[in-house]
Image: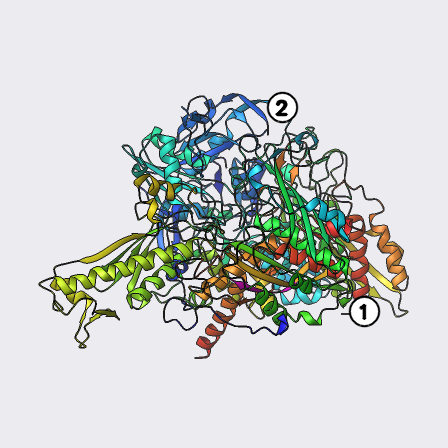
């Protein structure tokens, strides 16, 4: 059977299941549609003062003097915080749990490492007063030359990150012998996450208790950081984040502005609201760092891969090491007998880079999947056929078998839906009037990451069920799929389940990132729900007041809110709870490994990423897979590139809610379109200043940029990946989009662009 | 010069008295003074559309409108869109049915924009909807579903009119 | 923003007095409030002109369109008689900004919008001759892919951001103003000032002078006019390059009248007169059009980041005129 004849399954991998796997609408949807969903900065907190940050206007050097007299005298001003008048905090350990290099941390620092670094804060009665007063502060600097980016000669080659070195076989020897050898350099620019909800928080102290209303992808990790900064116990910090206005990786860590807000609130003894301006969301935190990678590819004349040698560089800040692992997918996608990958990080004067959707996998796939297309062209093969030729039967990196890999199915299903067989392979061969039409494709992958989670499930006397966890729902659909999980486990309609998330007082959860939330939290909720059911049944059987007392062990069933005995006698849950004098029964369960049950392990598990398991931790190598097919229309003379359609097929394992999974996939594709065609931090290389720090100049895609997107599910439950069979969803969609578009652009024009974004200007400059 | 001065705004059909400085925007007045936080601040410079609401029935940006400018005008925010009995507007229903949002932060602006887009007669084709909804950025990438929701709502509203 | 005062004058006399006293005019707010939040505009007194009576009419006759300064962009764009008489105006408006901004921004304010030069828009950048005359130009040598190639001076290379104004320049509109000295009619060609040595002087307006409206002559050439805007993002972005074009052919098949104006590439809305002159009286053959279009950027002074527009602009002219020949209105 040719791969293109492979059977294509449409619809969700969860089809047929009554509750979990159903395409339900979002349970938190109505609140968001009515405007009643209170995001962090929407909280009505009495007595708020407003803080505004002042930023450095140099990129390197130091602040020599801050004159805040006029600001302090301005109407409504309560305090001006500067490096001179604020005490340092204790430094916090890193997100991996590594202890800090320095004992102290100054969120307002006179030493300047990047343009836009926060150097002072004004707190006033109103936002308007604080904003205006911040303009009245005079700052003197002693500037030194800044290193502006990867291309700055002073930046040098950077520092090797040994942890990212990977090799097997003998890449050098294989390259020397290869019939076909390509050396290709790919670049991605500084990119920014840009959730539409800007970062910000309300901080309030009550004695030694600190409450923060702050959007958070990782409440426990952020609470730990705040606790360490301010010398508090973990349980003295409470983070409340019921809704998150998008994060995409940027809201997982406590950031310098948060420290300032909490400092100001403590100093003033009243709650302080601090929202970054949109411009400050470009300088107060970093997104994806700029990257460069050189791929040397060796193959047979028939296109079989022999070796890849990769050298990668990503920029980082002067005072922290952030890595964007460019070798993430390079050795994973295909059968690759010889591989050698190394990476350096290059310190430059920029804000510390962060994590933007699929950090590592995304730029890694841009390089590899562009290069595979170039190889296909070089050996005269169809790029889809070349991928199938080099399909990996197992993971060459770990030597382990795949748990599930439906990449061939994704390629086949996408190709059929797209009509790939009608593609004329010749570049510049397809036209529509003035437009050159290009069809391109690329594959993608994202690993299954796993950290233990914890959930509380309560069965209440009114027959409803409550699920509680400190995990976050930033639009991924956690509220909905966790309700579905509990409903499924307890045999109840989903409307009876209330889900409470986003409060660090609730049971612990690890970072909502790395696409691990759905798999691990459904597992925790499922386990807790079954345990709560057992408690309920136990109560019904053994409590002397229970009408079902003594029916016999292991005989009761819970169905539709009724406890049913073998003889058909049935009582509803509320009747049983009322009879036994209970308001609720509940169970708290975690998915920690048996050997990690000590309190310090428990704490470490949720407040650092140190216990996150690699996709190859176990007997299998576990990943999600996807294939994207795109059509571009290029007006060469008018230097205009537009996307016409996208068809993508995904293997994310079992889908807990296909409707919401489809939204996640499409959202990733849309962000990938922005990355491919529009998004680029533009740095003035005289001053290391980001020039397009706003949404008019840093271009996110608009609705008008996005064509029809068809998504196809080819996954099936993966029993190794998670308790209920799901694999990564949210980060997957973006991986492979940019190279698919670059490949389509080549097909349209015969011009290969290897730097993102793929603009009309770059196309024109390519000649 | 300008201590806060009294101002009455007509918000969702109700007169609301407040004290604001002349420099206070309609967006900050709604959010910080009237506790109407459904209207969101995304960029504060007219570059994202998150603060879209209706003034005298037309969609505008609250971040670039002074509260004073809105004196005497009819202001409708997302909180005022559903019916008095809480029945969701056809556009709200369509957003739920089509899953036209994820995080929900740009959503009030999208919905207010979509209501106006249909009312203006700019919901004729998918291409027209995309162009006339281009002033509302959605970073979760719900655009294809927003287009579907606008089409669904436009059909529903047309049925309502016929009936 | 500074703690400014706010006034809503009831008539032009009061408005003029408030402006002459140092007030800043507020129309839709999309320009002034944006710049005030950036600290680039520092109003002490804001004069809200939006409720002045009598400035929101659109009148279209056989020969002329008259548009009040307080007409909103969206209303003008949708005006049926305007769309028929001068489609390029509606197309330019609909290619501008977003639906929300078009519902707010006035035609008068649109004419007076300021450049999007990032160095101008960052109040912390010391060198900007537009903001601080004599301080220098930080843009030269910086990130300049959006900067001007035409009409530049060593003192300023900031691009005029408008769309409507490009159409107005193509069709010889006249700006009506009011000041205590009375009404004045000013050709749009004289309204926008080249930066030269005084980039801070952007408009030929006296202090306290108020733009009250526009008059656009409706020549036959206007009826077939169109506006084409190029940009990376499909919508809601300023132009990489734009063109307002009108062409009419005589009975002999030769070009009788031709209007071409460029946006996105010049310091003011830019009439491409050399291209017009080369084609008027000629047959609109592909060769003639191509040869003439190539003249458009002959005077251009590119920056390192915007050389791609040297080819883009002639291509835009060539394509647009070729299309117009092929698909007469």
Q: What residue does disc 2 label? A: A144
The quadrant where residue A437 appears: bottom right
Give the position of the N terminus of chain A as an image quadrant.
Answer: bottom right
> Magenta stretch containing residue B28, yes or no?
no
Q: Secondary structure at mark 1?
A: helix
Query: Of residues A312 and C28, which is closer to you in this image?
Result: A312
* Mark drawn on residue C326: 1
Question: In which chain is the residue bearing label 2?
Answer: A
Q: Which residues are magenta?
A: A644-651
> Magenta stretch containing residue A648, yes or no?
yes
The quadrant where residue A704 appears: bottom right
Q: Say if residue C188 shows up in the picture.
A: no
- Estimate how packed mark 1 is, as few (under 14), some (14 to 19) or many (20 or more) residues with alpha carbons within 10 Å: few
Residue at figure coordinates x 58%, y 48% from the top left: A328
Q: Say above or below: B28 vs A381.
A: above
Residue at figure coordinates x 50%, y 64% from the top left: A662
Q: Say if residue A722 shows up in the picture.
A: yes
Query: Of residues A399 and C268, which is closer to you in this image?
Result: A399
Mark 1 vs mark 2, CA separation in Å: 60 Å
Query: Of residues C214 and C310, which is closer to you in this image?
Result: C310
């Amino acid at each position: 059977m040719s791969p293109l004849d492979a059977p294509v399954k449409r619809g969700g991998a969860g089809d047929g299941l009554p509750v979990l796997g159903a395409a339900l609408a979002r349970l938190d949807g109505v609140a968001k549609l009515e405007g009643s969903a209170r995001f962090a900065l929407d909280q009505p907190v009495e007595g708020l003062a407003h803080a505004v940050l002042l930023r450095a206007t140099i990129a390197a050097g130091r602040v020599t003097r801050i004159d805040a007299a006029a600001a302090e005298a301005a109407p409504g001003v309560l305090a001006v915080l500067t490096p001179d008048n604020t005490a340092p905090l204790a430094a916090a350990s890193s997100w991996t749990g590594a202890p800090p290099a320095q004992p102290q941390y100054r969120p307002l620092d006179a030493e300047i490492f990047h343009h836009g670094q926060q150097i002072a804060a004004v707190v006033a009665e109103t936002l308007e007063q604080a904003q205006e007063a911040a303009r009245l502060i005079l700052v003197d600097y002693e500037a030194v030359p800044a290193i502006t980016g990867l291309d700055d000669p002073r930046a040098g080659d950077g520092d090797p990150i040994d942890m990212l070195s990977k090799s097997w076989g003998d890449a050098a020897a294989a390259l020397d012998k290869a019939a076909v050898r390509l050396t290709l350099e790919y670049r991605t620019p500084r990119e920014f996450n840009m959730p539409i909800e800007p970062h910000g928080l309300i901080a309030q102290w009550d004695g030694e208790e600190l409450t923060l209303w702050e959007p958070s992808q990782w409440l426990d990790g952020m609470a730990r950081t705040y606790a360490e900064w301010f010398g508090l116990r973990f349980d003295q910090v409470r983070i409340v984040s019921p809704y998150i206005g998008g994060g995409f990786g940027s809201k997982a860590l406590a950031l310098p502005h948060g420290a300032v807000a909490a400092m100001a609130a403590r100093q003033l003894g009243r709650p302080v609201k601090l929202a970054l301006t949109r411009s400050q969301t470009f300088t107060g935190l970093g997104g994806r760092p700029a990257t460069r990678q050189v791929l040397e590819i060796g193959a047979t004349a028939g296109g079989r891969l022999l070796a890849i040698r990769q050298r990668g560089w990503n920029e980082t800040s002067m005072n922290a090491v952030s890595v964007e692992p460019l070798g993430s997918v390079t050795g994973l996608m295909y059968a690759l007998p010889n591989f050698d990958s190394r990476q350096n990080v290059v310190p430059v004067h920029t804000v510390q880079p962060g994590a933007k959707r699929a950090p590592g996998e995304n730029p890694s796939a841009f390089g590899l999947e562009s290069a595979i297309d170039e190889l296909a062209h070089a050996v005269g093969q169809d790029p889809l056929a070349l991928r199938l030729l080099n399909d990996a039967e197992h993971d060459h990196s770990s030597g382990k078998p795949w748990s599930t890999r439906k990449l061939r199915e994704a390629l086949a299903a996408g190709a059929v839906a797209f009509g790939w067989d009608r593609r004329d392979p010749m570049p510049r061969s397809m036209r529509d009037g003035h437009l050159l039409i290009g069809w391109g494709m690329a594959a993608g992958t994202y690993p299954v990451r796993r950290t233990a989670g914890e959930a509380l499930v309560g069965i209440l006397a009114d027959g409803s069920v409550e699920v509680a966890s400190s995990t976050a729902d930033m639009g991924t659909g956690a509220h909905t799929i966790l309700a579905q999980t509990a409903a499924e486990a307890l045999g109840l309609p989903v409307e009876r389940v209330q889900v409470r998330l986003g409060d660090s007082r609730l049971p612990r959860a690890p970072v909502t990132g790395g696409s691990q939330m759905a798999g691990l939290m459904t597992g925790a909720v499922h386990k807790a729900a079954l345990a709560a059911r057992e408690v309920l049944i136990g109560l019904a059987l053994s409590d002397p007041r229970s009408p079902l007392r003594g029916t016999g062990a292991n005989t009761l069933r819970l169905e539709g809110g009724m406890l049913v005995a073998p003889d058909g006698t049935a009582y509803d849950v509320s009747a049983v709870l009322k009879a036994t004098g209970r308001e609720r029964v509940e169970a708290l369960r975690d998915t920690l490994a048996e050997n990690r049950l000590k309190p310090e392990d428990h704490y470490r598990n949720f407040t650092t990423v140190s216990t996150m398991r690699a996709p190859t931790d176990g007997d299998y190598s576990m990943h999600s897979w996807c294939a994207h097919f795109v059509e571009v229309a290029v007006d060469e003379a008018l230097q205009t590139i537009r996307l016409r359609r996208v068809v993508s097929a995904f293997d994310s394992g079992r889908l807990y809610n296909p409707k919401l999974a489809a939204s996640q996939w499409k959202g990733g594709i849309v962000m990938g379109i922005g990355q491919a065609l529009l998004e680029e931090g533009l740095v003035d290389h005289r001053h290391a200043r980001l020039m397009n720090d706003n949404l008019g100049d840093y271009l996110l895609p608009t609705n008008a940029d996005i064509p029809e997107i068809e998504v196809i599910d080819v996954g099936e439950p993966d029993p190794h990946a998670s308790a209920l069979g799901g694999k990564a969803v949210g980060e997957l969609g973006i991986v492979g989009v940019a190279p698919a578009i670059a490949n389509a652009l080549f097909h349209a024009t015969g011009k290969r662009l290897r730097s993102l974004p793929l603009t009309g200007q770059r196309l024109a400059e390519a000649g | 010069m300008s201590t806060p001065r009294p101002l009455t705004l007509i918000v969702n059909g109700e007169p609301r008295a407040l004290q604001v400085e002349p420099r206070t925007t309609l967006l900050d007045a709604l959010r910080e003074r009237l506790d109407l936080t459904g209207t969101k601040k995304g960029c504060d410079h007219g570059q994202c559309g998150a603060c879209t609401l209706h003034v005298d029935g037309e969609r505008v940006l609250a971040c670039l409108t002074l509260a004073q400018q809105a004196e005497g005008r009819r202001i409708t925010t997302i909180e005022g869109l559903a019916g008095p009995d809480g029945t969701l507007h056809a556009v709200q229903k369509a957003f739920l049915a089509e899953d036209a949002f994820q995080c929900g932060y740009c959503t009030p602006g999208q919905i207010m924009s979509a209501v106006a887009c249909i009312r203006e007669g700019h919901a004729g084709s998918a291409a027209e909807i995309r162009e006339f909804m281009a002033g509302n950025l959605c970073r979760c990438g719900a655009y294809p579903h927003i287009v579907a929701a606008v089409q669904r709502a436009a059909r529903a509203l047309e049925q309502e009119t016929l009936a | 923003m500074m703690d400014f005062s706010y006034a809503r004058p009831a008539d032009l006399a009061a408005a003029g007095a408030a402006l002459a006293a140092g007030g800043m005019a507020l129309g839709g707010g999309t320009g002034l409030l944006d710049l005030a939040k950036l600290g680039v505009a520092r109003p002490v007194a804001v004069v809200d002109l939006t409720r002045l009576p009598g400035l929101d009419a659109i009148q279209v006759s056989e020969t002329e369109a008259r548009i009040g300064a307080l007409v909103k962009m969206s209303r003008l764009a949708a005006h049926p008689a305007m769309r028929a008489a001068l489609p390029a105006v509606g197309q330019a408006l609909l290619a501008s900004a977003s639906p929300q901004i078009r519902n707010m921004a006035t035609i008068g304010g649109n004419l007076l919008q300021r450049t999007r030069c990032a160095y101008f828009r960052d109040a912390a950048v010391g060198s900007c001759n537009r903001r601080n005359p004599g301080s220098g130009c930080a843009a030269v040598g910086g990130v300049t892919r959006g900067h001007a190639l035409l009409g530049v001076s060593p003192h300023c290379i900031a691009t005029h951001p408008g769309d409507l104004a490009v159409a107005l320049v193509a069709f010889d509109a006249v700006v009506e103003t009011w000041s205590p000295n009375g009404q004045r009619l000013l050709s749009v060609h004289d309204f926008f000032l080249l930066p030269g040595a005084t980039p801070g002087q952007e408009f030929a307006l006296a202090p306290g002078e108020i733009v009250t409206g526009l008059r656009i002559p409706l020549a036959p050439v206007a009826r077939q006019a169109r506006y084409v805007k190029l940009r990376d993002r499909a919508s809601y972005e300023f132009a990489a390059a734009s063109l307002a074009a009108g062409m009419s052919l005589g009975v002999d098949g030769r070009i009788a009248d031709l209007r071409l104006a460029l946006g996105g590439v010049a310091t003011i809305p830019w009439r491409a007169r050399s291209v017009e002159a080369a084609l008027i009286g000629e047959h609109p053959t592909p060769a003639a059009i191509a040869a003439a279009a190539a003249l458009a950027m002959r005077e251009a002074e590119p920056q390192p980041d915007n050389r791609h527009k040297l080819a883009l602009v002639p291509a835009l002219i060539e394509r647009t005129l070729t299309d117009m020949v092929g698909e007469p209105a």
